[in-house]
Amino acid sequence: MAKLFWLEPVLPLGIIAGMLCVMGNAQYYIHRAAHGRPKHIGNDVWDVAMERRDKKIVEQYSAN
C-alpha cells in the first residue's frame, strides 16, 4: 500500500479537471443556445481593433 501514495491527489485533481471541462462546455452550449451559433474565438474588442489597425497599415503601405 505504500507504493500507492500518488493515488491520493489523483481524485481531487480529476474532480477539478472535470469541473473545468463542465464549465467550458456550459459556456459553449449557453452561448450557442442564446445566439444560435458557436462563439468565434479571438473576436473581442481588442482583436477587432488590431484587425482595423493592420488593415489601415497595409492600405497605407500599398498606397506608397
Image: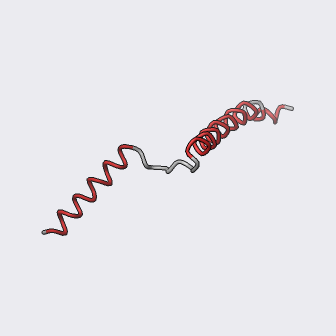
- Residue 43 screen position, x and y as percent: 43, 49
Tell me how the rendering is colored: secondary structure
| Residue 5 figure quarter | top right
Residue 48, given in percent of the width and then of the height, sits at 35, 49
- Residue at (78, 34) in percent of width and height: 7
User: Along the horizontal axis of the image, is 27 left or right of 52?
Assistant: right
Query: Quadrant location of the N terminus?
Result: top right
Residue drawn where x is 67% and y is 38% of the image: 22
Q: Is residue 31 left or right of residue 52?
A: right
Q: Furthest-left residue in view?
A: 64
Residue occupying image coordinates x 37% and y 43%: 45
- Indicate the position of residue 31 as horizontal and vertical percent values: 57, 42
**Residue 2 in the image, given as x and y percentages of width and height:** 83, 31
* Residue at the (74%, 35%) spot, across then down: 10
User: Is residue 41 depicted above or below 55 in this figure?
Assistant: above
The quadrant of the image that shows the C terminus is: bottom left
Q: Nearer the viewer, residue 15 or 43?
A: 43
Pick whichever, 17 or 26, lies toward us: 26
Which quarter of the figure has residue 57? Answer: bottom left
* Tally of marks: 0
